[in-house]
Image (spheres, rainbow, N blue to C red):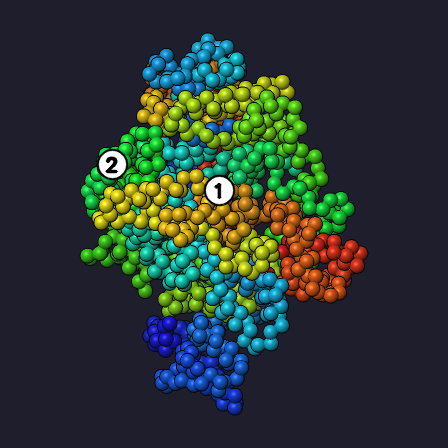
């Protein structure tokens, strides 16, 4: 864990550049059982002691039992996620910046503070991607801890639901798709790599850097999936890179000078040239799908592929055009679906180049189109690009991800749309100082997204009731609170899953692609032909596995296990969700282009809520809601129980009376009718 | 008012107008030329409905609509005469051969896409697949250009796939996907019936009202509307349009997905749905083409012939355009696995009904079925031909939310010679 003091020093350095970097005005005050205060930053637990750093820089150990119970609880929490002095200072700073601008624009202050019941539902949905269970709701509602809000935020940020929900966001942004290619090449290892990066809270700039620098196939290096994703559409891939990493949509400039923006067609190809000698190989070329065999396999000794094919023919009776050898060729092609640097490759301006800055057929040399020039000196083009992206003076990279994460918390980003905005739009954004501040914070926390979100969730702005009037997208919004949001498809799905299966669903794993990863993980320089052949035998076990199933391996390394269970959280399913699922109905991106999730309603969605499987289970003949509430006595408690289960809030007096009336008139049927009604009121799908 | 209306159809004035608009709005000139296509949209448009049967995987052209005398390229397939002199089919298409006078064949399809996904994409949208935008299929285009037709039923339905989208157009224009033609619309089986269902609906409305009133957002209000629509749908007879279980001629269409899909398409069109796509797989015959065609072609023959006859007997053939498309043909050379590989350089598609001049064979390949000899038709041309048949204004520019301009089927030219 990074020492907070070290952070403080980095923070102080930043002050010389930017006056608004956070300094914790004071660290948390700890209280001993005999009432004495200790102002210090908490460093962790050592045996039976707590370790602190005092304001003078000294480190001290103090026995746990010297502290009051509330502080002991806080210490247990902070030991897992780190001291929160900086988090709170930073959150206060954001609130200050927002409030100042709010006042300038005629607002008294933030929206009213969010009541506890709405808070618990919102943080469960925002952080873990699902509604809380009735038990989780009650645990919070009944807790008397003074720090229960920050404690819940921290607990949820450390829970498996956090990375699951964040995965859904990146799956949309990075267009994670399990089977996008010809020749049966699958991306499951790459997709699972994303899951692992988020579970391990890997800093975002390192995730990006691993993807851009990746070499090999998805078995050798799953991060290579990022570059393999758009094989054959390299310039489109670069357009996506611009949108996702820089918040600039320059796709127009692929074919002509950008009509409204400053980019020329030449700019496009010069920037794209950073990937100009990146080879994504054995790409489909030409008219026959079988015609790609003679291309040199990257990351393998010369002639490796031909030699192996010949060996297989001589020793295993594989004839390249044999009836049974299609699978063999698919296997060899999949091995070769590979990222490599190839100095012989160049970015060449296309034959129909009509823009400024070049002529058809000319070579485009790498040049960054914004900010300081990337320095190649001795580095590969991709290394130079990565260094340029995460350099402290890059004008876009940190801002883009900070702005996106802000949008996740508030339902609207400071500059929209998050994948295409100009420098002018940044300057004119409603909360430009807050944006500059959180951009610096993103760098200060070293792209630790969990710590960054922890700051946002601790702001007063976030913990306000949602703005009741829909903000006009074309007008400035000053963040007096979050906006009302419909659940993402994955939130709706995961909430259904938790209603049907309880909180245990968070622990349940789907296929991780590891068997497939193992098949493709061949070191061509050291493997014998027999070794590679054994991988082919594993590959044959995949046949009949079906395209939508995922793979896990268990025990014997040569045995695939096919997970064909759809009762999983959205992030654990094959990506994107297999067709006809509720996820698709509710707007999950099909991952063809970036940021495609949509929040519109539809008749099929409503039908799924009215008559779908989960509704049937909860409110049908053997109603799960009725049996779950059996332990409760009296209609009042049962009505509250239904509200806690579905909407996670207390019913109003009117609602209580209505529900009680239903139970008095119709008994258990009334309970499941009430549950059905709550699931089918628009409130269920919204995060307020 | 649409730009096309403002600009009129005259090419010079339209181009001028486009550039003026660009200059007025952005202070610069658009460097993408948009030239109008050389026909008048109002010449087509006899078709009010479209049934687009899409054979996914790449239908062999030699064994179906473009057979050759050369035995080397034909393998086991023999030539069959149709009821039209110059129109020949492969031997499995026995029923369709009796309907040659109702069919227009294009034997000069040519594509640059040898991969399934890219090939299918352009055949169904008229645009090359890109990783930065998704183009709409015919249904959303027709609804945009012609206006919404139905009140309860959707304007377009996609049979045989479980997901659909409207590309860059409004998601409300997405075709309703019906994965299994015999399965109907998902989630329409009520959990509780009668009075108890009504009670649930009323209570949901009552409990939801406070929330809808509290937040002045369009989203929650739209859900109230969707609940009303769903309720109307569940209580109307409209759902029966998706139920083919009691159709008397189910067996005539063939008890397979393609056949049942065509039957459902007919029923939907009859009930007012404008565009129905029927997608069926199983055409990627890399191995043993003789067995593959013996399996698939009789199904296709039966389904399509029954569809043509069924629409005809119901007086719907003139107003319903039937299109049969695929992403590419298959190699004239039979490979070592006795199969045929992908072949985009020459393939066949057909059209029927909806103003098509029956008995027409358009375009021609050489004696081996290898090269297009005359009148090449690109995927976007095929789509433009469909649009022409439906009376879509092919010059009308529609802008994506990112302000990129699009016209139906890109710059494709309709094959007007196929229309009577």
Q: Are marks 1 and 2 in contact (CB under 8 Å)?
A: no
Q: As rendered, which of A56 and A319 lies closer to the eye?
A: A319
Can you name the residue that lies furthest to the right here?
A: A665
| Residue B384 seen in the figure | no
| Residue A600 seen in the figure | yes
Residues packed near mark 1 inside 10 Å, few (<14), some (14 to 19) or many (20 plus): some
The reply, left or right, for residue B80 in relation to residue A8 is right
Label 1 – label 2 distance at C-alpha: 53 Å
Q: Label 2, secondary structure: give it.
A: helix
Residue topped by disc 1: B168
Residue B123 in percent (x, y) is at: 44, 31
Residue A244 in percent (x, y) is at: 39, 53
Residue A33 in percent (x, y) is at: 52, 88
| Residue at 31% over, 49% down | A521
Residue A305 in the image: above or below residue A105: above
The mark lying in front, picked from 1 and 2, is 2
State the mark number for residue A315: 2
Residue B370 in percent (x, y) is at: 33, 21
Q: Label 1, secondary structure: give it.
A: loop
Q: As rendered, which of A277 and A187 lies closer to the eye?
A: A187
Residue A311 picture quarter: top left
Please give the chain letter of the residue carrying mark 1: B
Can you name the residue that lies furthest to the front here?
A: A556
């Amino acid at each position: 864990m990074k020492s907070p003091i070290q952070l403080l020093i980095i923070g102080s350095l930043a002050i010389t550049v930017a006056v608004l970097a956070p300094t914790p005005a004071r660290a948390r005050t700890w209280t001993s059982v005999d009432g004495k205060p200790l102002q210090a930053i908490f460093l962790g637990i050592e045996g039976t002691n707590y370790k602190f750093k005092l304001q003078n820089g000294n480190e001290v150990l103090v026995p746990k039992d010297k502290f009051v119970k509330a502080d002991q609880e806080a210490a247990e929490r902070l030991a897992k996620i780190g001291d929160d002095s900086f988090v709170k200072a930073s959150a206060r700073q954001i609130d200050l910046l927002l409030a100042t601008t709010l006042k300038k624009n005629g607002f008294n202050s933030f929206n009213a503070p969010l009541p506890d019941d709405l808070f618990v539902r919102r943080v469960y949905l925002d952080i873990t991607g699902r509604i809380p269970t009735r038990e989780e709701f009650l645990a919070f509602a009944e807790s008397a801890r003074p720090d229960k809000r920050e404690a819940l935020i921290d607990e949820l940020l450390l829970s498996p639901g956090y990375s699951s929900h964040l995965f859904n966001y990146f799956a949309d942004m990075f267009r994670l798709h399990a089977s996008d290619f010809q020749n049966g090449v699958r991306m499951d290892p790459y997709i699972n790599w994303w899951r692992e990066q988020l579970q391990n809270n890997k800093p975002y700039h390192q995730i990006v850097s691993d993807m851009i620098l990746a070499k090999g196939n998805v078995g050798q290096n799953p991060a290579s999936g990022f570059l393999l994703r758009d094989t054959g559409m390299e310039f489109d891939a670069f357009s996506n890179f611009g949108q996702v990493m820089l918040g600039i949509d320059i796709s127009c400039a692929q074919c002509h000078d950008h009509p409204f923006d400053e980019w020329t067609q030449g700019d496009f190809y010069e920037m794209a040239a950073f990937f100009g000698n990146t080879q994504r190989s054995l790409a489909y070329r030409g008219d026959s799908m079988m015609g790609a065999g003679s291309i040199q396999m990257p990351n393998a000794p010369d002639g490796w592929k031909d030699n192996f094919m010949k060996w297989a023919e001589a020793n295993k009776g594989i004839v390249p055009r044999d009836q049974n050898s299609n699978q063999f060729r698919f296997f060899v092609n999949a091995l070769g679906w590979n990222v490599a640097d190839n100095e012989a490759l160049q970015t060449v301006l296309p034959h129909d180049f009509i823009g400024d800055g070049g002529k058809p057929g000319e070579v485009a040399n790498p040049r960054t189109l914004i900010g300081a020039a990337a320095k190649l000196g001795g580095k590969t083009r991709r290394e130079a690009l990565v260094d340029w992206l995460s350099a402290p003076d890059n004008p876009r990279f940190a801002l883009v991800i900070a702005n996106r994460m802000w949008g996740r918390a508030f339902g609207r980003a400071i500059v929209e749309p998050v994948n295409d905005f100009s420098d002018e739009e940044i300057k004119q954004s409603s909360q430009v100082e807050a944006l500059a501040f959180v951009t610096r914070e993103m760098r200060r926390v070293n792209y630790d997204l969990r710590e960054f979100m922890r700051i946002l969730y601790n702001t007063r702005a976030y913990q306000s009731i949602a703005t009741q009037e829909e903000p006009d997208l074309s007008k400035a919004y000053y963040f007096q609170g979050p906006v009302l949001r419909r659940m993402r498809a994955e939130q709706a799905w995961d909430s259904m899953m938790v209603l049907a299966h309880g909180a245990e669903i968070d622990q349940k794993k789907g296929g991780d692609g590891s068997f497939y990863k193992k098949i493709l993980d061949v070191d061509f320089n050291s493997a014998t032909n027999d070794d590679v052949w054994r991988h082919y035998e594993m590959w044959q076990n995949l046949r009949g596995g079906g395209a939508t199933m995922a793979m896990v391996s268990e025990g014997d390394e040569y045995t695939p296990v096919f997970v064909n269970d759809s009762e999983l959280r959205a992030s654990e399913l094959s990506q994107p969700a297999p067709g006809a699922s509720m996820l698709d109905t509710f707007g999950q991106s099909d991952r063809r282009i970036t940021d495609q999730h949509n929040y519109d309603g539809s008749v099929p969605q409503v039908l799924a809520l009215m008559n779908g499987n989960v509704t049937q289970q909860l409110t049908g003949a053997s109603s799960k809601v009725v049996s779950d509430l059996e332990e409760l006595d009296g209609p009042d408690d049962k009505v509250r129980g239904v509200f806690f289960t579905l909407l996670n809030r207390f019913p109003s007096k009117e609602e209580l009376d209505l529900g009680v009336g239903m139970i008095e008139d119709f008994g258990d049927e009334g309970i499941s009718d009430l549950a059905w009604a709550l699931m089918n009121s628009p409130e269920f799908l919204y995060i307020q | 008012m649409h730009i096309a209306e403002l600009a009129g159809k005259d090419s010079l004035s339209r181009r001028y107008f486009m550039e003026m608009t660009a200059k007025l709005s952005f202070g610069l000139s658009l460097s993408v030329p948009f030239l109008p296509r050389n026909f008048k949209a109002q010449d087509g448009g006899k078709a009010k409905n479209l049934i687009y049967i899409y054979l996914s995987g790449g239908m062999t052209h030699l064994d179906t609509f473009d057979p050759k005398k050369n035995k080397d390229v034909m393998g086991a397939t023999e030539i069959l005469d149709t009821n039209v002199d110059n129109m020949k089919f492969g031997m499995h298409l026995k029923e369709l051969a009796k309907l040659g006078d109702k069919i227009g064949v294009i034997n000069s399809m040519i594509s640059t896409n040898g991969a399934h996904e890219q090939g299918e994409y352009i055949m169904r949208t008229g645009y090359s697949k890109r990783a930065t935008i998704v183009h709409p299929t015919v249904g959303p285009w027709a609804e945009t250009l012609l206006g919404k037709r139905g009140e309860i039923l959707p304007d377009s339905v996609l049979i045989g796939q479980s997901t659909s989208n409207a590309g860059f157009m409004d998601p409300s224009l997405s075709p309703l996907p019906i994965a299994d033609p015999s399965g109907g619309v998902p989630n329409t089986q009520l959990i509780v019936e009668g009075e108890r269902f009504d009670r649930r609906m009323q209570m949901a409305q009552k409990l939801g009202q406070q929330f809808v009133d509290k937040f002045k957002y369009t989203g929650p209000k739209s859900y109230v509307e969707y609940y009303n629509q769903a309720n109307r749908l569940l209580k109307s007879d409209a759902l029966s349009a998706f139920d083919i279980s009691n159709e008397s001629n189910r067996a005539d269409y063939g008890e397979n997905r393609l056949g049942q899909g065509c039957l459902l398409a007919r029923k939907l069109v009859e009930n007012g749905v404008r565009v129905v796509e029927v997608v069926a797989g199983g055409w990627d015959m890399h191995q043993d083409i003789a067995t593959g065609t013996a399996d698939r072609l009789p199904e296709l023959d039966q389904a399509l012939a029954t569809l043509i006859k069924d629409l005809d007997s119901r007086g719907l053939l003139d107003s319903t355009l039937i299109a049969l498309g695929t992403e590419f043909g298959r190699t004239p050379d039979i490979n070592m696995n006795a199969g045929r590989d992908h072949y985009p350089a020459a393939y066949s598609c057909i059209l029927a009904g909806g103003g098509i001049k029956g008995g027409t064979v358009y375009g021609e390949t050489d004696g081996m079925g290898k090269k297009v000899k005359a009148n090449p038709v690109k995927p976007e041309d095929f789509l433009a031909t469909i649009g022409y048949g439906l009376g879509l204004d092919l010059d009308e520019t529609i802008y994506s939310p990112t302000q990129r301009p699009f016209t139906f089927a890109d710059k494709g030219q309709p094959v007007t010679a196929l229309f009577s």
